[in-house]
Amino acid sequence: MNKNKRQSVAEKKQRLIKQIEQQRHQLSMASKEWLEVTEPYDRSWQIFVSFRPIFIAAAGLISIYTLKQPKRIFSLGKKALTTWGLVRSIQNAVNISKK
């Protein structure tokens, strides 16, 4: 290999190394941004996972209840939806009064 060829290969290598460094920096910035954006979802998921044993116990109790009284499963569903709607309404009312 002549000197000119080696020099062009070295320059190309330096350009590629610089490009890789830029890509790593961009990836790092995108990763930080992604973590910032998804932080509320991560917190919500952690809260949900912390209540997992309670959900499992509640599901067991509900299944026993519905086995004893299978016709009441629909009324239980209606009550659950009504309770959920009531909780959401109260949350919205509290959030509006805070603003």
Image: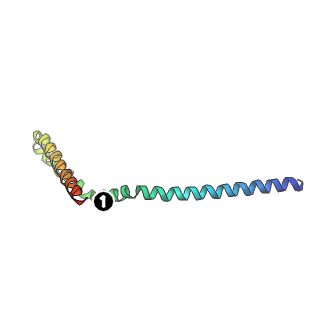
- Please indicate whether residue 90 sits to the left or right of residue 11 in the image: left
The C terminus - image quarter: bottom left
Q: Secondary structure at mark 1?
A: helix
Outermost residue on the right side: it is 2
Residue at point 59% right, 59% down?
25
* Residue drawn at (16%, 52%) of the image: 61
Pick whichever, 46 or 61, lies toward us. Answer: 46
- Counting from the top left corner in percent of width and height, residue 7 is at 83, 56
- Foreground of the two, 33 or 17: 33
Residue 74 in the image: above or below residue 45: above
- The location of residue 39, given as percent across then percent down, is 40, 58
Residue drawn at point x = 23 percent, y = 55 percent: 96
Q: How is the image coloured?
A: rainbow
Say if 87 sits above or below 66 in the image: below
Coordinates of residue 37 in the picture (x, y in percent): 42, 55
Please, what is the three-letter code of the amino acid marked with disc 1?
A: Ile
